[in-house]
Image (tube, coloured by chain):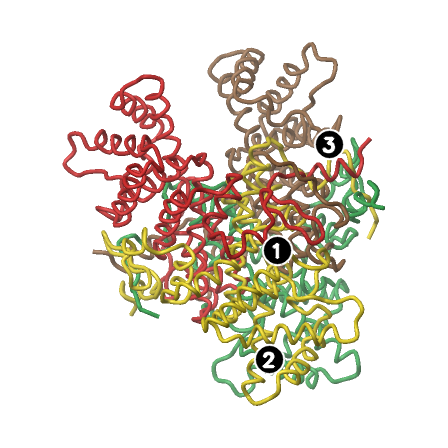
Chain colours: A green, B brown, C red, D yellow
Amino acid sequence: MTTVSDVADWWANGICRMEPGVVELRGIPVQELIGSTGLVATIWLMTRGELPDPREAALLEAALVASVDHGPQAPSIAIARMSITCGVGLNNAMASGVNALGDVHGGAGEQCVELLAEIVALEASGEALDAAVATVVARWRERSRYLPGYGHRFHPVDPRRDPLLALVDRAVADGVVAGRHAAAARAVEVELNRGRSKPVPMNIDGATAVIYAELGFPAPLARGLFVLSRSVGILAHAWEESTQGRRNKGPVPPSILPTYRPG
Amino acid sequence: MTTVSDVADWWANGICRMEPGVVELRGIPVQELIGSTGLVATIWLMTRGELPDPREAALLEAALVASVDHGPQAPSIAIARMSITCGVGLNNAMASGVNALGDVHGGAGEQCVELLAEIVALEASGEALDAAVATVVARWRERSRYLPGYGHRFHPVDPRRDPLLALVDRAVADGVVAGRHAAAARAVEVELNRGRSKPVPMNIDGATAVIYAELGFPAPLARGLFVLSRSVGILAHAWEESTQGRRNKGPVPPSILPTYRPG
Amino acid sequence: MTTVSDVADWWANGICRMEPGVVELRGIPVQELIGSTGLVATIWLMTRGELPDPREAALLEAALVASVDHGPQAPSIAIARMSITCGVGLNNAMASGVNALGDVHGGAGEQCVELLAEIVALEASGEALDAAVATVVARWRERSRYLPGYGHRFHPVDPRRDPLLALVDRAVADGVVAGRHAAAARAVEVELNRGRSKPVPMNIDGATAVIYAELGFPAPLARGLFVLSRSVGILAHAWEESTQGRRNKGPVPPSILPTYRPG
Amino acid sequence: MTTVSDVADWWANGICRMEPGVVELRGIPVQELIGSTGLVATIWLMTRGELPDPREAALLEAALVASVDHGPQAPSIAIARMSITCGVGLNNAMASGVNALGDVHGGAGEQCVELLAEIVALEASGEALDAAVATVVARWRERSRYLPGYGHRFHPVDPRRDPLLALVDRAVADGVVAGRHAAAARAVEVELNRGRSKPVPMNIDGATAVIYAELGFPAPLARGLFVLSRSVGILAHAWEESTQGRRNKGPVPPSILPTYRPG
């Protein structure tokens, strides 16, 4: 027979404990966090279950800052700006922007963490790095011509990539992270560019994936972290648009009629 | 005649400038932010247009940390947990959680900023604080029996309130913020509790509204900031739920059939 | 003390009764509907609690057919098309399109039903139609320069308007509906165009609002019905886009960079 | 060089043609549809490009009617009800419900169409039906222990199944559809139940998948059609909840606190 206790169990969770007058996050009273713990450390605590080392938090923070925005050519940003002109709340416009961060728009970091994890696992089983890279890249290439984390249709060199990798290198030097995923990511780049005149460089998704993977985040959380980061840009754009007074903003000026092509 | 330049203008914005190899956020090359600027300062930059004083950022950070989660009784959290069991991406589950942060669930902070702004404006026009409070509270009471930022159906005293107000007091003492909205918020509490045996204390939405208002955020951004904060809890819960393997999680255990009442 | 029965009551509803082997919709076993009852009659049953007269259903059907699509200049359609290129499910892309049908994009019908209801109520209290119209239009004009259901930034005459009004007239002649909201809507048009050289004609939202109001739907359901109708176009567009293979479709061709204007 | 014509091409589509005063849906002026074409035929027109035979439309209509609701134990319905109590628009609450119709909650029909298509294709290549079924079922079983369209955790026999299959049988007898997918679906059922005491019957997703497949809808549209159908129930429930005045409805009565289990 079902009991009220079963109902409470149905919503059991290990993240937040509530009682009247009590809010505990991962076992820590919330008032102990307020004023002493940063937002990024709190993100880590909530998703991982414990507080990070400050140098780990700093590395994560750099990745989160790097991805906040990529302008209104990004569908997520354009969607949020269009939505807010339709008479919905700021949260609704943000939701539709976030909703677009799917496998193609928001999933490259997640997929790149998987890619790097496969290489590091092969290496851990005794294979040489170059051989592991060749095996794994070939495996991914069979499935898709896009290798997540590499190449960009817009930036020849992404300005966010080198600063992030420099921070990873310093963290490796300081013993904060082990550096295996960073090495794997660079070896993939070498493999990709062998014999090519036009290089396919590691992009922002690759560089942040290196950080997430080095810090031990499971692949799906890479997408979750990207959502948190890009939500900042989505908010800023939706808010700016809301102050400009457009109504029902379409994708192009109203004077431009879409072409019709019977399909 | 419409031109390609009109099309570029249609998406003009003051937040993000892109060129091949260039990403500038509010006029600052993104690579200058990575590693030197925190996530909270970046949130400020993106929404306000310039970087904050570090003590301003610290106060904002405390408010953002305080609101990350309130457990699965909160509809936003429950919705995200249910959604992720339905076979959608983590970003989709987060979107539906954020989508629920409407006027009633996520709007109290925004409304409380408006309330405090009305009081401070009246005071600035020469009225005494107590009189301004009485006028504005009466005006809001006409529209609704809920005064945004006060009272809680669950916590007799919200554990997040006093730590936040203590940080505001310190910021006032340090000259970081002026303290007028904090004073107004406390005067509202006194007004509300006059002659009541059971007090209606300022709640978390009130305490964070004080911070957002003291820091100069327009009211709608209070909701936007809350969305950023609660997205952390939404992510943590959706992710935890996704690791537990439920499929199509309903609101109550499947053995409990809803009652039918012909309407 | 809370009991399991309280939990069942928490989800009590008057729409759907379930038992193992039983699904009843508004008291009717679902198997009695399948094959004998149309989709539009089922929409009516689900939202109103009983089945409509077939001539009522036919009038509702015409309104639902009329609004299915208005091309990709409509933000809802563009958003769905952009979303589906981001690697989300068809349901997720449809959700973001529907999410944009807010007060400005999807609310005109709802607001127009309110407008017409106010006029009809004044008339019912004894005022002459023209006077009631003048009073109510003046009241709405104070709040906004847009009168919901009138004018269109694109169509000088909306091709959907006259066929819908002709069906309403026939339904009035047949005694299916009373015709008061239709008369009010036309009187508003006369009032609006008095002394104007360029007319402000009733638009599709006005014409469908007349139908929803004549059929007795409460105003908020006018938006709900529009969502059901436009979801058809949203699906068709998202599906078409998904067959075309674009990835991360931005609002304009990638060669067009948005202009940057420091805000 | 990019031109304005390229911009118009960027949004080219084969569904809706607009000019001032003109709305054409799949080449048909919308005014020719209003009053003469039903909603279900319009759904077919919009997604398939041409109008159906009335008997095809009738079969589709039965499938759409059958799936409108399954009560608030369904996450999509519960999410919409919870969302509307949070102070968002009816369209926003509906969007979050639809957003939950993912691979697990809304995808069984789509997957079952794929399953049946694989069997029919094998059969078309010369294999006997039973052998084709055995091969394909084995292939799907390798990937998951759930076979889409079969079994139900709630209904021993789904009351919607037999009426739908009876309509299919009649359509086969009348030469409206060929019946190959229906035969395949029944053969799967026989295969599944061989040697089992507790049968695993075809469920509603299986029965509607048979209809969608017989009518020639590509698999992904099966999910799209289900979204249109379930949106009716989502609207009815969100609307009913909105009339009941709850605020921030959680998944269980507020007196029931979730259990905390440090993860």
Question: Is label 3 or label 2 in front?
Answer: 2
Q: Chain of mark 1?
A: A
**Residue at image mark 2:** D119
Say yes or no: labels 3 and 2 on the same chain. Answer: no
D237 or A189: nearer the eye?
D237
Q: Secondary structure at mark 2?
A: helix
Q: Nearer the viewer, residue C195 or A102?
A: C195
Chain of the residue under label 3: B
Q: In the image as oriented, which residue stretches furthest toward the bottom?
A: D126
Residue assigned mark 3: B163
Query: Circle 1 — which element?
Result: helix
Three-letter residue code for mark 3 = Pro
Question: What kind of residue is marked 2?
Answer: Ile
Residue topped by disc 1 = A64
Residue C181 relative to residue B158: left or right: left
Label 3: which secondary element = helix
Q: Is residue C220 left or right of residue A12?
A: left
Q: Residue at x 60, y 81 (%)?
A: A190
**In whole angstroms, how far apart are the C-alphas of marks 2 and 1?**
47 Å
Instruction: Say which chain tag 2 marks.
Output: D
Mark 2 and mark 3 in contact (Cβ < 8 Å)? no
- Crowd class of label 3 (few under 14; some 14 to 19; many from 20; radius 10 Å): many
Crowding near pointer 1: few (<14 within 10 Å), some, many (20+)? many
Which image quarter is the C terminus of chain C in?
Answer: top left
- Along the horizontal axis of the image, is B66 left or right of A93? right
Percent across and percent down for residue D97 are 57, 49
User: Alpha-carbon neighbours of circle 2 within 10 Å: few (<14), some, or many (≥20)?
Assistant: many
Residue visible at 53% across and 35% down in the picture: B217
